[in-house]
Amino acid sequence: MSDKFTLVRAPLITDPDGSTNGEYEKCSYAFFPGCCLCANEPEIAAKVYDSLLFQNPDTAIFMECCENADEIREKWSALGKPEMILCCTECEEFFAGSLADIPTVSLYDKFLEYEISGGCNSVDYCLHESVKGSDSPDFAGCSVAALAKDMGADLHKYEEGSPFPYLVCDISVRNDLKESGHDAAHILELMFGMGASNTHLIHEHDHDDGVGSNSDGDESQTGGASPDDSECDGNCAACAGCSDKPHPPQALPTDAQKASNRLELKDVLLALYWNEL
């Protein structure tokens, strides 16, 4: 990642009256979103940081790519050697191998600790094998599964070619699945809003005991639905009472769009949290 995309900074100290008094000299935590989340879903990255700041106002932002271990260690030390909050397995593997002296914690473990949850989501998902703990009985100890279940999602064990969208915790895995023709959603999309590439999973429509209205206002039977099928959560692909085809997914961001997203995220964070326009 180029320096122009990098943002490693302690948050401002906010007094009770709302005024700011410099930046924290020592931070307890630092959010390390990773370049993939920032490039593909910058809005989600900003929402995650806001949630972490609400819990601990001395949480730094550490927008940096896993390329230079010595540089990361130097910047981490300058922040007061905070615990790094990671949100993808690739970053976890990098820190475990090249930066083992730096304490880390999973974002999803912290969300469980803070009891942070998303809205209601009753869609069925297949927990992808890349998610840590997905191979345990009933997903025991899997924080991603626990967060999804807390929102009401029904989870199924991993199977290749699953009829359900895959649930992942790595943006790169989500993108790989989409590029190979599979539906996939990131756990943070469930919690903070579906990304643009997942709009095909949701289809707004009305059901009235299995009978819908066409564009002319005439009522027509939708797929032979029974009264039990009349309630639809918006996921037409899994709705027995819906005859509409799911919308095709929007294209994933291009390299140029990813670069623009990272720059925009940096500007937004500087404006929101450091009053730098």
Image: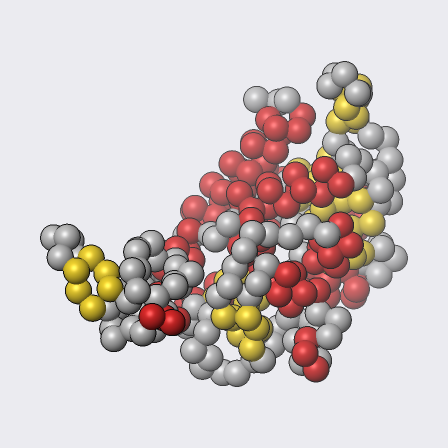
Q: Quadrant of residue 272?
A: top right
Vertical side of 64 occupied by 224: above or below: below
Residue 185 coordinates in the image, percent (x, y): 50, 62
Which residue is nearer to you in this view: 45 or 148? Answer: 148
Q: Is residue 181 left or right of residue 51?
A: left
> Residue at 43% of width from left, 47% of height from top?
256
Residue 81 coordinates in the image, percent (x, y): 86, 45
> Residue at 67% of width from left, 25% of height from top?
274
Which residue is nearer to you in this view: 35 or 187? Answer: 187
Residue 174 coordinates in the image, percent (x, y): 51, 64
Vertical side of 53 occupied by 230: above or below: below
Would residue 115 be seen by someone viewing this image from the given angle? Answer: yes
Q: Is residue 171 left or right of residue 163?
A: right
Which residue is nearer to you in this view: 169 or 251? Answer: 169
For the C terminus, which image quadrant? top right
Residue 182 coordinates in the image, percent (x, y): 42, 71
> Residue at 47% of width from left, 52% of height from top?
195
Would residue 86 be seen by someone viewing this image from the given angle? Answer: no
Which residue is nearer to you in this view: 268 or 63? Answer: 268
